Structure formats: C-alpha cells, structure tokens
Amino acid sequence: MTTPHTYVTTTIPYVNARPHLGFALELVQADVLARFRRARGDRVRFQTGTDDNSLKNVLAAEAAGVAVQEFVDRNAEAFVALREPLALAVDDVIRTSRDPRHRVGVERLWQACADAGDLYRKHYEGLYCVGCEQFYTPAELAGGRCPEHGVEPQRVAEENWFFRLSRYADRLHDLVSSGRLRVEPAERRNEVLGFIAGGLEDLSVSRSTARARGWGIPVPGDPGQVVYVWWDALGNYVTALDYGTGGENYRRWWTGAGRRVHLVGKGVLRFHAVYWPALLLSAGQPPPTDVVVHDYLTAGGRKISKSGGGTADPVALAGEYGTDAVRWWLLREVPRVGDADFTVDRLVARANDELANGLGNLVNRVVTMVHRYREGRVPRTESGTGAPGGEGLEAACRRAPGLVRSALDDFEFRRATAPVWAVVDEANRYVDHSRPWALARAERDGDPGAPGAPGVTARLDAVLAALVRACETLGDQLAPFLPGTAARIAAQCTARDGRLPEPCPVFRRITVPEPGAVP
C-alpha cells in the first residue's frame, strides 16, 4: 500500500510591507493541516513563499527611496522569519525574485499554454487596481472604487498578451460542480460557479515592461512585456517543485499527490479556483484538488491589511503573549464563514480562560495529585474509571480523534478544536465530581468505602489513572494546533524512572498591565 502524499500551500503575499495577522491565519491553518496529516502517516509537503514581482512592491520601494531588490529582500525576510514565532513546520519557502526554480518554471508554463494555442496579443483598455493587480469591469466596482481597497482604479490602455480563459468555462464548471476541484466552504464554491456561469472573458496575462518599471519576468520572446504578476505568482505552486526542469519533486508532489491543497483568502478566490486551474488545463497538467478559503480578519471593523490601515503584527503578538496564544485565537475564534474582529483583549481572554485556567490548571492539578497521593507513580488500572461519573470523560477521549479528523478533512478548523475542548471540560467536571482529595483523605483515615463498592484505594487509583489518560489524549490531539503546549503536556505525563516529572505549568496566565500602571 502506497503512502498518501499531500501538498499543502499558502498564497504568497506581496512584500510591499511587513506581514500582518491576516496572513498568519493562513499560515497557521496550513500548518495544522500539515502536522495533522503527517501524524496520521501521510507524506506531506508544506510550502509558502513571497510574491516579489508585483508593481505594488516597486511603488512601495520608490516611496521608501530604496532600490527595488533591496526593498523586496528586506521585507521578504520578515515573511520568511514567521516560521519560528508562529511555530510553523514549513518544508519549503519560495521567493519569486530570487529562487532559480521560479523563472524557468514560469517560462515553461507560458510556453505550454502558447503551444496549446491559448495565448494571443491584442490592444486593451480597462480599469486597473494596482493594489489587487487586476482589471475590473465597471459593474464590479463599488461606487466607482475597488471593492477591496476603496480606491479609484487607473484607466490603462496598452497592447498585452491574453489567455483564452473563455475556452475553459465548461471544463472549469464541471471540475468545481463535480467536486474534483473542491472549493470550501460551500458559499465560496457557489460564488465560483456563479462567476463561471456569468461568462468568462479572456484574461490579460502580461503588462508592458515600461508600466512594470522593468520589474518582473519577461514574456518569452517578447522583451517589451513582462508576465502578469498573478500568472507569475500562481506558478509558484509548481515552479517550487522543479516543474521548469521536469524534476522528481513535481512528479511526487503534484502529478502524483493524492491531495493538492491551496489555502487562500476570499479576495483571491477567482485566481485560484478559476484562472489557475484554467492555466493548468491549457498546459496539460492536473489542477489542484482543493481550494480552502478563509474570510478576513478585521481590527476595529476594518480589514487587517498591509496597506488598508488596520494592522496587527503577529511577531510582536507572539513575543508578547506567546506563540500558542496567537495560534489558539486564530483557530478558536475565526469562523468558517464571516470575518473575525481581532483585539488583544479577546486574545488574552481566550488564552487565560481556556489555555491557562481550563487546560493548564487541569494538567497541573492532575500531576500534582499523582505526586501527592501516589508519589508521582501513575496507578496501573484497567481502561474503566472504576468510579461513577467517569463515563463522560472516557467517551470524550474516545470520540475526540475521530471528530478532529472529520473536521480537518472538511477543513473546519474551529470545529476541529471543539472535541479537544470537550475532553478538557469533561476532565475538569470529573475532578470536581470524583473529588480525589476526599478519596485520599478517606484512604488515609482507613475508610473502606460503601458496602459492595470498590475500595477507596482502587477508586482513587482509577480516578488518577483516568485523569492522566485524559491529559495524554489532550497532548496527542492538541499537537497539530498547539505544538508547544502539546509537547509540555506530553512531557508532564511521561514517567521517568517510574515517576512523572514535578508539576510545571504548561501554559502560564497572561497578565496585562493596567493602563497607566508603572512597570
């Protein structure tokens, strides 16, 4: 039996400014998928990168008075450096202006589409948003302004290369409607199908070298044009696999992978679920299998973005409040559909209520009681708790793995955390119900217990063993979501020389100074 191969990617962001929390959401979601599938035995490749070749980057560099490559390198490094503060298990990072794999792959993709007869030149006039790096029709504008950036688009007139997108409308509709290209959630799938049904016009896929300020990949055989930045950027998903040279990675992770999963924001849905699969069909290559779409994060009701005003620095947040506090907020608070408004107060409240008070307190209490009542040795018992009230905890532990798997197979991250948290809630209820401290006192006082019931010692052993098993379940099931916290739980529940380690907090409560307080 062959091992399933899964290729997981994020979009590659423009590097016109430093990263924000909205992109961190996508990275964390992709990381959870990658970690989860690795843990169940899949071979997984998790890739991210940076989109260096956009006009937005050029304009930002000019505004900063810095050479474009220097500017791009500096900001790209900030994105690459997200790996540690967000605890990302990334396998590869591609930079489109620096990586030698990229240009040759873009050129090969261009030539394949040209050989299919899908590229032609024509004069074009349209309304172009530099922020989106795309043309809009008047009907797509909101009051004459870009719906994403709220600015009036520029009127552009030039001769460009066009891709025959209209040729692929029926095949794209069939791909998406059949589920062979799975777009999740359903609201976004319906959006894609509606866009296709509305009629697909051929797509401008190059820009004049002059308008691009000479930045980007030249069109093969036409140095007066550069490849449209979205063609360039979308190509990263295969160029990083050595598509340009026909490398083994491409055969292993694209044509040979069981799942080719793109995680994207709702603002770039059509690029990934319409334009990108059409380019691949033209080139005779398989399309992605899954496009997983998240909505936006907002701050004070405004979309968090590099240029839109609302912002939140994921590195600063992780440094101040901890990596797992940031990851947990992104996974527990962000809905499957709909934007989520971020505040530091919400992040801290979620972390303190659940990670410190709920989870951390539970693990600490359990390890402390094993030390206090059994000198650190976990009692050996059968799987049953041996005491009334433990059935709910055992059921929660038994159900959690399957429920987590089902949710993540559906790309529902918030739903996936719920069965894990059910174990925390049941374990804390079980502590309160079973009252191990009272059992220990009865054991010390020589109370044999109720007639016909298990002895006090056996009951206390069963309670402690059940609680340690619950903590072990939490360490296992939290590993894709909170790798640091999960590792600390596992360490607390792993005996050395027959004894558990001394109790140590797995998540410390976050203390936020009162406004005006003196440090």
Image (tube, helix red, strand yellow):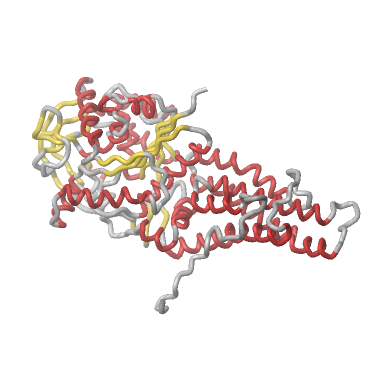
Q: Is residue 506 left or right of residue 162?
A: right
Q: Is residue 259 left or right of residue 106?
A: right
Quadrant in which the C terminus appears: bottom left
Q: Nearer the viewer, residue 10 or 461?
A: 461
Quadrant in the picture for residue 110 = top left
Residue 193 higher or lower than 370, as above or below: above
Residue 252 higher or lower than 354, as above or below: above
x then y, percent, for residue 111? 20, 24
Q: Is residue 393 left or right of residue 18?
A: right
Q: Is residue 198 visible from the viewing direction of this image?
A: no
Quadrant in the picture for residue 99 = top left
x then y, percent, for residue 43? 45, 32
- Please name the residue shown 52% across and 22% down the image: 1
Q: Nearer the viewer, residue 424 or 69?
A: 69
- Please name the residue shown 23% across and 35% down the image: 100
x then y, percent, for residue 310? 32, 59
x then y, percent, for residue 286? 35, 25
Total numbered circles: 0
Residue 9 higher or lower than 76, as above or below: above
Q: Nearer the viewer, residue 519 or 276?
A: 519
Q: Is residue 54 visible from the viewing direction of this image?
A: yes
Q: Residue furthest front?
A: 497
